[in-house]
Amino acid sequence: MRKLTYYVGTTLDGFIAGPDGQFDFFPFEGDLAAALLAEYPETIPAHGRGPLGLDGVANKRFDTVLMGRVTYEPGLAAGVTSPYPHLKQYVLSRTLAQLDPAVEVVPTDPVAFVRDLKKQDGEGIWLCGGANLAGQLLEEIDELIIKRHPVVIGSGIPLFDAPFRPSGFKLTDSRVFNTGAAITTYAKETSIPILLRPTTEADLDRVTVRHPRPAAPQTPAAAPATAGPR
């Protein structure tokens, strides 16, 4: 089964972009940038791969990217209709028209689509954003990889835009960089099923028998007092 990973950058106060979708306040420098280029080269869009020396570099984790309309549109404004040609690209939107044969617009239910996608052969699936799509797919997210930058913006687009619905994740990795940024990785917390079955002879061999302590002798109860007049 393929895994859906929400890999995204956030501020310290939990925003993935500013109120108008701006994200130029996220620095891309130092040892954090080096780690991202080495470990997640496929997450760099086409226009940045050449300048960053990624031409011809193979994908490391993902072969598919999912985007919401709001995440896809900034590229369109700059004339980029296929931001990740080295990945299979899907934009989940009921209102966007098909603009590039390399990018498939999916107008159907995101949850059903992702469940079917996970059953297909392939590598990891990268949920690029945004908040609304992540909120719809919360139950299908298997892993969170959060790039937390040392900046506070006060307001903006949150990590998830969804109704109140607590969902547990467990920490599997955490790294802090000289830039002050950190990458934390979480896996979905799943409950362990309890199997109930009849006891067998083998089970009895693991039972330690404890004899109950003899009960202390009881003193005779006093005779009840005679009830007086009422």
Image: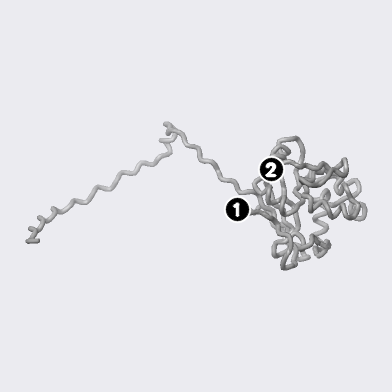
| Coloration of the structure image | one colour
Whether residue 53 is visible to the viewer of this picture, yes or no, is no
> Residue 167 location, x and y as percent?
61, 52
- The front one of 183 and 45 is 45
Q: Which mark is residue 111?
A: 2
Position of the C terminus, as image quadrant, is bottom left
User: How packed is label 1: few (under 14 Cα within 10 Å), some, or many (20 or more)?
Assistant: few
Question: Which of the 4 quarters of the picture holds residue 152?
Answer: bottom right
Residue type marked 1: Arg
> Amino acid type of disc 2?
Val
List x then y, in percent, for residue 23.
80, 61
Judged from the image, the secondary structure of the residue bearing numbered disc 1 is loop
Q: Please provide percent x and percent y for residue 97.
A: 83, 44
Q: Nearer the viewer, residue 175 or 23?
A: 23
Identity of the residue furthest to the top in this view? 201
Residue 158, percent from left and from top:
71, 59
Residue drawn at 84 percent across, 43 percent down: 98
Query: Which residue is tagged 1?
Result: 165
Q: Secondary structure at mark 2?
A: helix
Q: Residue sitting at 82 percent across and 44 percent down?
A: 89
Q: Residue at x 59, y 46 (%)?
A: 190
Q: Can residue 59 be seen in the rendering of this structure?
A: yes
